[in-house]
Every structure is written in C-alpha cells, then in structure tokens.
Image (cartoon, rainbow, N blue to C red):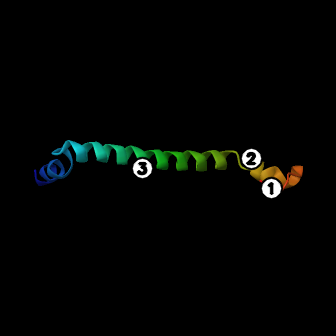
Amino acid sequence: MGLSSTIYQTIFKRNSVFVGSIFFGAFAFGLGFDTATNKLWENHNKGKLWADIRDKVGGSEEE
C-alpha cells in the first residue's frame, strides 16, 4: 500500500498537480506518437518520398 499512498500524495491529492501531470502526459504522448508515426511512414514509403527522388527528378536545391 506504500506505492499507492505515495502516488496519491504526489499526484492526485492536489488538483493543480493532477491537471498539470495530465497536460504534460498528453504533450509527451503527442510528441512521441508524432515521431513514431513519421518514422513508420518514412520507412514504409522509402524511395517514394520527394526527399528520396529529388535528385532523380531534378528538383532545385532551395528546398
């Protein structure tokens, strides 16, 4: 019961800390999810993306 008491005392006891931890968790999850899905998309479409075929098509170096 020590772990649940510690979690309650540090996170759930004060509403401001609880709401802040929810916002922080959502922000961290959003960053992690975006990074993971971008990596998955780039690996799945390797060779088909503009960054991969830019030199073959003759795209400008400005981008």
Q: Amino acid at mark 3?
A: Ala
User: What residue sits 85% from the left and 54% below the top?
Assistant: 60
On residue 14, which mark appears? none
Give the residue number, with chain letter if any, for mark 1: 62
| Relative image position of residue 52 (x, y in whole percent) | 77, 52
Amino acid type shown at disc 1 = Glu
Q: Going by the image, does 38 lie left or right of 19?
A: right
Residue at 30% x, 47% y: name it.
21
Q: Earlier in the sequence, mark 2 or mark 3?
A: 3
> Which residue is the site of mark 2?
49
Label 1 crowd bin: few (<14), some (14–19), many (20+), radius 10 Å = few
Q: Secondary structure at mark 1?
A: loop
Going by the image, does 41 lie left or right of 10?
right
Which residue type does callout 2 highlight? Leu
Q: CB atoms at circles 1 and 3 under 8 Å apart?
A: no
Q: Is residue 15 left or right of residue 44?
A: left
Percent from the top left, x then y, of residue 56?
87, 53
**Residue pictured at 16% horizontal, 47% vertical:** 8
Image coordinates of residue 12 in percent, x first then y, are: 19, 44
Quick one: SS at disc 3?
Answer: helix
Q: Are marks 1 and 2 in contact (CB under 8 Å)?
A: no
Residue designated by label 3: 28
The secondary element bearing badge 2 is classed as: loop
Instruction: Report the Cα–Cα distance between label 1 and label 2.
Output: 17 Å
Q: Nearer the viewer, mark 1 or mark 2?
A: 1
For label 2, the crowd category at 10 Å Cα-Cα, with few meaning under 14, some 14 to 19 and many 20 or more, is: few
3D distance between C-alphas at marks 2 and 3: 27 Å
Q: Residues within 10 Å of mark 3 (few under 14, many from 20)?
A: few
